[in-house]
Image (cartoon, rainbow, N blue to C red):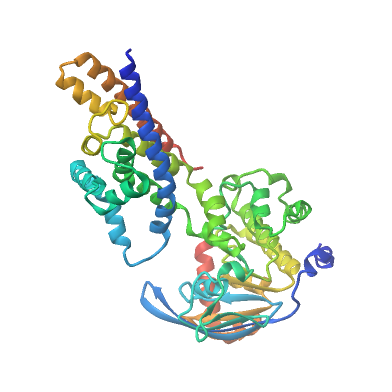
Amino acid sequence: MNEDFINTLLLTGKLATWTTVVLFLIGMPLAYLLAYKRFWFKSLLEAFISMPMVLPPTVLGFYMLVAYSPQNAFGRFLEQHFDVRLAFSFEGVLIASVVFSLPFMIQPLQNGLVAIPQSLREAAYTLGKSEFTTFYRVLIPNMIPSIITALAMTFAHCIGEFGVVIMVGGNMPGETRVASIAIYDEVQALNYDVANQYSLVLFLISLAILTVIYSMNRKPAS
Amino acid sequence: MERNITDNGKFSSSLRGKGSLKIDIEREMLTSDGKMPLKVQTEISGNELLCLFGHSGSGKTTLLRILAGLNVPDKGYVEFNGKVWFDSAKKINLPPQQRNVGYMFQDYALFPNMTVERNIAFAQKEKNAGEILRLMEIFGLTELARQKPHKLSGGQKQRVALARALAAKPNMLLLDEPLSALDYEMRIDLQNEILKAHQMLNSLTILVSHDIQEVQKLASSVILLRNGAVQAQGDCAELISHYPENRNTVIGYKANRCV
């Protein structure tokens, strides 16, 4: 196996890992809000989070590119204050990937929280525990399967991401060239052997992750 | 047995002594027949074992949840031992965390991720391992200390829930139909556990029930709720003689359940 092949797979893993970590940190509080709180823009927020499920990745990628451009406020702010250009960089792809994978993280977490009997939270409150203590001592330990599902779904989805990455990141080896893009590229160059190697690796990883999720959700709770 | 418990100084030292619970609340309840107002105005002295008695849908559980701070009345006033818990006019509403009530849920609400011992320890405001052991001994849980709740029977779960509620040293104990999920023999056993818990607490215990025998055995006084309003309040025997229609419905209900 050549170095290019390994680097591409490592980059794919790096993008998926970072996306999963960042999304978990954002997703947990968001899922908590959506599961338990009432506020006037809740439906709108839910709709936004679910948009990547129905929107072509190119649409999101396009808007990300526009936002990253130094000709617009967000891109100009980043360039002037941090000397950062996000378009066609790993960080830019990471942000787009986080946005695009939101529903895959939020929905299992939200479902997991809703499935916990309300009386458990209320019992903790009557015992004098704050919402935060209740969250990490009672809620999180009782939704581990949902958390694993959320992490695995996000990771798996991220490994398979193509449209957003190519829109925002292009095809730069070592920076934005992930496996799904490499496959497309190799096929265009008629290197079917390499494309096959990439494809097989992605196929097996995804199969393994989904098998773990399904077997875990089959296990009865008690 | 009972004397041992009341003589034990650990709990009585944390008591607030006799006080009273003043309730004057209104809340609209959603029932299967549509909206119904819950309107309760009463005063209960501080160390009763009071039973909220009535048909399902009469507002018993809602009233209990209002006392715990889990439901909010539309308007009114709740005061316990001189401290205002809720006052809609002054916009006071203490959260459940600050009311220090022990609440036992119908499903017991034991934390599935924690062992029996940990469930009790979690409730303690200050860690005290000796106290956990003592509570487990009193409620016959010593051998179950390392079991997770899903392995326990209904009666065992109830005893853990009682021990856990007491571990927080509450100044009021609220029990929502504690025995309804248990079979007949288990109930007799656990009625004694409830009396025990009430004596350890030496403060106000409020119990929701629709079982007249349970009420007769446990309660020092009764509030009869009907369609969201207090129909009568007082001594248990008196209530039955004054409201024989309740006796019939309840006995009919029990007969159905036992068959």
Q: In this view, does B127 lie above or below A212?
A: below
Q: In this view, does B245 lie above or below B130?
A: below
Question: What residue lies at 57% left-to-right and 71% top-to-bottom?
Answer: B68
Indicate the position of residue A47 as horizontal and vertical percent values: 27, 55
Image location of residue A206, percent across then percent down: 33, 29
Give whichever of B137, A69 is nearer the camera: A69
A36 vs B259, left or right, is left
**Measured along the vertical axis of the image, is residue A71 above or below residue B65?**
above
Residue at 21 percent of width and 37 percent of height: A163
Residue A149 visible to an observer of this rendering: no
Q: Taking the image as drawn, is residue B179 in sight?
A: yes
Residue at (51% x, 81% y) in the render: B91
Q: Provide residue A182's location: percent of width, then percent of height.
A: 24, 24
Q: In which quarter of the image is residue A1?
A: top left
Quadrant of residue A162 within the rendered picture:
top left
- Quadrant of residue A168 within the rendered picture: top left
Front residue of A174 and B119: A174
Q: Position of residue A157 (x, y in %)?
A: 31, 36
Count of marks, rendered view = 0
Give the residue at x 71% y 81%.
B19
Q: Nearer the viewer, residue B152 or B216?
A: B152
Position of A21 compared to B214: left or right?
left
Question: Is residue A9 rendered to the left or right of residue B171?
Answer: left
Q: Is A139 placed left or right of A20 in the picture?
A: right
